[in-house]
Image (spheres, grey):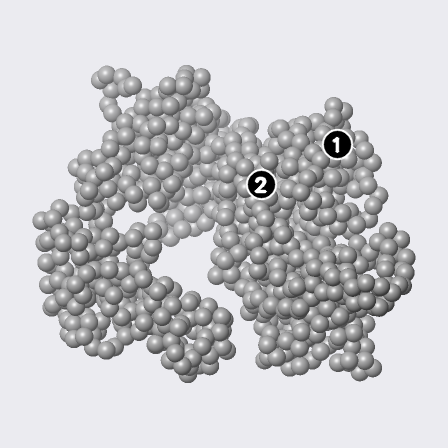
Amino acid sequence: MMPIETPEQKARKKIDKQLNDAGWDIVPRDEYVPKNAQAVEEMLMQGNKESDYLLFVDDKAIAVVEAKREENSLGDDVADQAEFYATHPQNWYGLWLDGFIPLVYMANGKKIYFKDMRDANSDYVELNGMHSPKQMLKIINGQSEYGALPRLERRGLRDCQYRAELKFEEHLKYGKKRNLAILATGSGKTYLACLASYRLLNYTPARRILFLVDRNNLARQTEAEFSQFDRTEGQQEMSSLYRISRLRKPADIKSEIVISTIQKLFAVMTGQSISEMSEDAEDERTTEEEEKKAQETIVLGDDIQVPPDYFDLIIVDECHRSIYGKWKAVLDYFTGATVLGLTATPTPEAFAFFDMNIVENYTYDQSVVDGVNVPFRVYRIKTQVTEHGGAIKEGTTVTETSRKTGEKTTKTVHHREDYSESDLDRSIVNEDQIREVLTAYRNAIYTELYPDREERWEYVPKTLIFAKDDRHASEILEGVRDVFGPLFEGGEVPDNFVQKITYSSDDSNGLIRDLRIEKDFRIAITVTLVATGTDVKPLEVVLFMKDVNSDVLYTQMKGRGCRVVKEDRLREVTPNAITKDCYYIVDAIGVTEHDKVIPHPATGQGGKKILTLEQLLEHLAHNELSDENLVLLRDYCATINMRYEGNRLFGHHLDYFINSYGFAPKTIAANIQTAIDNGLLDVCQYIDPSHNNTERMNLIYQLIGNIDARKKLLEMQRGYVLNTDEDPDELIYAGFSQETAKKFIDNFEHYLTENKDSIEALRIIYNSEDTLITHTMLTELQERLLAESRQYTPYNIWKNYKVIDDEGNVDELDTKTNVHALTHLIQIVRYAYGKNRKLTSLITGYAKRFALYCGQAQRVLTADQVEIMRQVAEFVINDGAITLMELNEIDTDLWRRGVTSFGAPTLATEMQTLSNFLLKAA
């Protein structure tokens, strides 16, 4: 039965929503994080009073909100209470005005009243909604660089976008000028850029933003996305709020949002005319230049037409490109700008340029798990000529074509001419080889790739073929017509069935659009124009007839097919399709089989009360970064670190802290001591919490900005230094002395003995039954153990066995693998019941047992079947055996692949056999 809410609780829910809607994050007082617009609950005021909400902007209290139940009329008594709080803040809070908090609000969930305390005689005014941070700053004429940024609403954003924007804004507040967002293809990089741009233009002093793209066709797409972005205060499209321009003439640079390639930007900066070459040809030439190993570095010169502080934010899309080599001087020129890099494929050069300031790292594999993208499968086509080259025999008639003029000459070869596979489609075009590859692809479409689809050749899966150059693309175009033509009435493919999208095409942008939405356009052939950033969700096959040496470019090219598309939208353009649960890379050149190249870049006062650590962390979070407080934090952190470092019983707490949060307590102590030794604290003097203390906060922000780390530090200190009244649950994972460990194990084994008949997994192991231990059984066992004692986790039990092990029978549990694996319970119980002489993880030796399973006689697994069973094995080895139905619930895609590859009965048998191999006594 749900507890009944009190009138106060009901009102608080409504007031919380009003504050959230106005852009305020609501936090308990012990979870305040500096430099955020936050409404802190139950905040301490003078006289040991508590304000219902105290609102902070830039770590300075700007408003008091007094909350009452809905029935309360919010009269003079409430006003007196609220105004008392406004005039009696704690002396360690930062304040916007000396001695008092300027704004007061009274709310009951239904009505909101507001008063500006700068005029104590003014009347309360009823509001329709709570003021936002931006509105409050405007009321008091407060100046803030980032204080007006409201809370970020998660709704409508992918988790990766939400995390990236939060971290980006956090970095801005702490002066980190270069930031890198690594986001998988298809996860919404441009939408993130729109969001960041709008929030900076609307809530900060930023007035002009540059969005750099590496291709002109991406500039066109970006302009459309920015123009249509409507996640704004009034849901207006961004184009109605700001001028958005692609840089095509010098005047365009005056817009609030400028979208440009770096080449066009360079031309405007240096007063040169913008190239009149077609944008598609320019894009293909740029790609050719990038594939060359050496590139001349650009020099800006002295006569620059744009000032270095012209842009407040520069967003560099697809920043994996080598622009930081050739074009680095252009970005370096804009010294005042914050730079946000966006890429799915970071390089060491990019990491270096952005100082390793990563705001998000969202991989392709994670995007597949989250359903943002679909996985790929490789279908390989090899021909003799492709693999080994060929020979032009004596007497053969050949046609020679001039690359420059296109002039053709026919001649007869008088001597045999051998050529290698690297000559193919560059100096030698073997039309039969092209047709051989295309024929092999055609024959596989409805037999191996999509056997469940109705054979309708007018609706072959949408396919993108990568050619070596425009001439090669033309040869492939004719090859597609020849190979697919006989399947249609009249012996010719329909109009628009296959088309080139290269610089020589009349309207490449229109062709890309048609590839997305038109049913009759089935096969596109390109060189580079559709290689990066282009979104064609219904695309299901990427066919490589061009080798690629760059790992970055290859990842971008194959990523054209990874987009998820809804089934109804897919069937609109491919009527015989069922669903897009993967896409195929058809490799006709060996591109998937060789390594790729990744580009490289070039002291306290006597007699004064000492704050507890808990009090100190709260003061520091509110910007009270005095020398005394920093030194006190240094001493606390150093002491706590010393107590845990090398501690045989409790050292794992320090390990957990370091592994979870990326730093040790002594890191903070060292930061503070180094600042003292180097004189930084003397240079950056502390005045009071209302002043800018960024340099001091940077010393400790790893701790202060991480709520979990703060709580863990307090937990570690309370457990072994201070006497507290709080529940000491934090000691659950502590190590034990041999005496304590022996008592722990005695109690644990007594529980196993008492329940050997009532818990299925225990019964099977105790009786040595030839029955698989399933995931369901292990889940039940885990739940029963934790119900008996919260200390009965696999990790804790294992560690206690290790403490009392004097004969080397208990292996050290590898904390780099899954320490929480349920299958550890199988081995623990086997060891406890005396079935195994040693306590060894099943994960150890897992690869060898999986190989034994794969190598059984009487049947041979295909590569795809091995991969399917490997993924099943990864679950089984951690969590126990599962049924076919459970596999469907856990991973529907894997289940579907398995059933398709094996058939349901065989797959069920294979899963049981596999589980026997993996979970047998080790």
Q: Position of residue 148 (x, y in %)?
A: 53, 36
How many marks can you see? 2
Residue 381's image quarter?
Answer: bottom right
Q: Where is residue 920 in the image (x, y as percent from the top left)?
A: 27, 70
Q: Of the residues under marks 1 and 2, which one precedes in the sequence?
A: 1
Q: Is mark 2 on a helix, strand or loop?
A: loop
Mark 1 lies on residue: 269
575 over 594 or under it: above or below = below
Q: Where is residue 457 in the image (x, y as percent from the top left)?
A: 71, 78
- What amino acid is labelled 2 in the image? His
Residue shown at 51% from the left, 31% from the top:
175
Residue nearest the observer in this picture, 856 or 44: 856
Residue 873's image quarter?
Answer: bottom left
| Residues under numbered marks 1 and 2 in contact, where contact means CB atoms less than 8 Å apart | no
Residue shown at 36% from the left, 63% from the top:
847
Question: Label 1, label 2: how many angstroms apart (C-alpha)?
Answer: 27 Å
Residue 914's image quarter?
Answer: bottom left
Of badges 1 and 2, the one in the foreground is 2
Judge the density around disc 2: few (<14), some (14-19), many (≥20) Cα neighbours within 10 Å: few
Q: In the drawing, does residue 340 fall left or right of residue 10?
A: right
Q: Where is residue 773 in the image (x, y as percent from the top left)?
A: 27, 72
Q: Residue 664 carries which label?
A: none
153 over 32 or under it: above or below = below
245 over 788 or under it: above or below = above
Quadrant for the C terminus in the image: bottom left
Q: In the drawing, does residue 14 fall left or right of residue 227?
A: left
- What amino acid is labelled 1 in the image? Met
| Res 77 visible | no
Q: In the drawing, does residue 889 fall left or right of residue 520?
A: left
Residue shown at 77% from the left, 61% from the top:
417
Mark 2 lies on residue: 600
